[in-house]
Image (tube, rainbow, N blue to C red):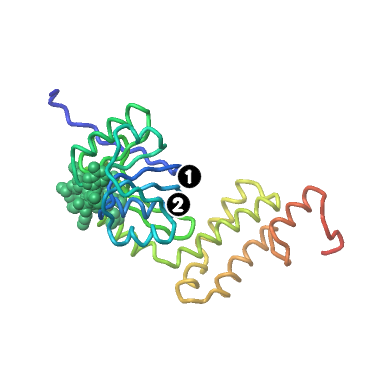
Amino acid sequence: MTGEKELRCDYLLALDLRGLPVLVVGGGAVGARKTEGLIQCGARVTVVSPKLAPQLERRVREGAVRWEPREYHVGEAGAYRLVFAAAGNPEVNRRVAEDARASGVWINVADRPELGNLRVPASFRRGPLTVAVSTAGGSPWLAQAFRKLLEEVIDPAYGPFVEQMVEARQRLRAAGVGVSERREAFAEIWRSQALDRWRSGDAPGAKAVVEAILERWGAGDHGDSADRIAKKRSGHDPDPLGD
Ligand SMILES: C[C@@]1(CC(=O)O)c2cc3[nH]c(cc4nc(cc5[nH]c(cc(n2)[C@H]1CCC(=O)O)[C@@](C)(CC(=O)O)[C@@H]5CCC(=O)O)C(CC(=O)O)=C4CCC(=O)O)c(CCC(=O)O)c3CC(=O)O
Ligand SMILES: NC(=O)C1=CN([C@@H]2O[C@H](COP(=O)(O)OP(=O)(O)OC[C@H]3O[C@@H](n4cnc5c(N)ncnc54)[C@H](O)[C@@H]3O)[C@@H](O)[C@H]2O)C=CC1
């Protein structure tokens, strides 16, 4: 013991897990929660567990996850890229963690986080936006409380609004609008009535507000898709007399 306070510092990354082989050991409530988040992001999940929580049974029936109805085999964690140890038995979780670490595989340990090298933040989504909260293992309950608080502030109307922001960026770039002008355009959309229109259920109104801004920045729609604008700029206009 050094007497110094342990450094708690989570470096939050955004992982693209599509197609990645991931192992979840233990299919109880905790394993089910982790598995659900992984499936939603397109990971190829294998659950090794003698028993399954009901929500996981449903996912197995749907074919969303592979289930090996048995106990964990020593060494098998090394065959995956990412491993979650969520068995009810601490001895098993410790073994899984050792195997993963020996093979340089990223490992999350549900009951003894310090045996692993990654933690799962509390999170929620609004379209392509993910909001995540971590307390570096210090207070999972507080992470959950902050997630709930932020879910109220960043309400569901942000879903389509974020989609609009993404499309606006694509169109501005395709129209050749430079980065400093793009910043201004985004700030205009941010300050506009678009979000309030989504909140009041006025989708056509929200679209019209953003359309007017893009028009002024030279990225108006005119029935053109971003794809066609890009082709135009590269000299491959399929319809040169179109406008
Ligand atoms: C270190 C970490 C490792 C990891 O699992 O990645 C970990 C560890 C442990 N959690 C424990 C308990 C609880 N965990 C929750 C909830 C969540 N736990 C999550 C993450 C993490 N939990 C990682 C740190 C994240 C961070 O610090 O920010 C969330 C955010 C994400 C998720 O799991 O998907 C999800 C909320 C999701 C949401 O709702 O948004 C609740 C709340 C409840 O159940 O009501 C409780 C009870 C209250 C309490 O204890 O706080 C115990 C003791 C177990 C025991 O004693 O049996 C340990 C072990 C230990 O700390 O030693
Ligand atoms: N990280 C977190 O957010 C939290 C962690 N925990 C901890 O997570 C662990 C799991 O919690 P729960 O899902 O609620 O427990 P649970 O008892 O509901 O589920 C445990 C699962 O592990 C399986 N299992 C047991 N031995 C196994 C083996 N040898 N190989 C493979 N699977 C095996 C069981 O069949 C069962 O499906 C506990 O150690 C608990 O202390 C608890 C709450 C929150």
Relative to 198, does residue 123 appear above or below in the rendering? above
Nearest the camera: 128 or 191?
128
Q: In which quarter of the image is residue 29?
A: bottom left
Q: Please state the horizontal and vertical placement of residue 197, each as a whole percent of the image.
A: 50, 73
Q: Residues within 10 Å of mark 1 (few under 14, many from 20)?
A: few
Nearest the camera: 112 or 155?
112
Q: Please state the horizontal and vertical placement of residue 63, each as a whole percent of the image.
A: 44, 57
Q: Can residue 142 be seen in this view?
A: no
Q: What's the residue type where badge 1 is placed? A: Asp
Identified at 60% across, 58% down, the residue is: 168
Residue, far front:
70
Q: Disc 1 designates what residue?
A: 16
Q: In which quarter of the image is residue 32?
A: bottom left
In the figure, is residue 156 to the left or right of 24? right
Q: Disc 2 designates what residue?
A: 41
What SS does tag 1 mark?
loop
Q: Can residue 240 be seen in this view?
A: yes
Nearest the camera: 114 or 131?
114
Q: Please state the horizontal and vertical placement of residue 146, each as a whole percent of the image.
A: 28, 55
Report if the CB atoms under discs 1 and 2 are less than 8 Å apart.
yes
Q: Quadrant of residue 239?
A: bottom right
Q: What's the residue type where badge 2 is placed? A: Cys
Residue 39 is tagged as none
Q: Distance between the residues labelled 1 and 2?
A: 8 Å
In which quadrant is the N terminus drawn? top left
Label located before the other in sequence (1 or 2): 1
What SS does tag 2 mark?
loop
Identified at 47% across, 42% down, the residue is: 20
Q: Please state the horizontal and vertical placement of residue 212, each as a whole percent of the image.
A: 63, 67
Q: How crowded is mark 2: few (under 14 residues within 10 Å), some or many (20 or more)?
A: some
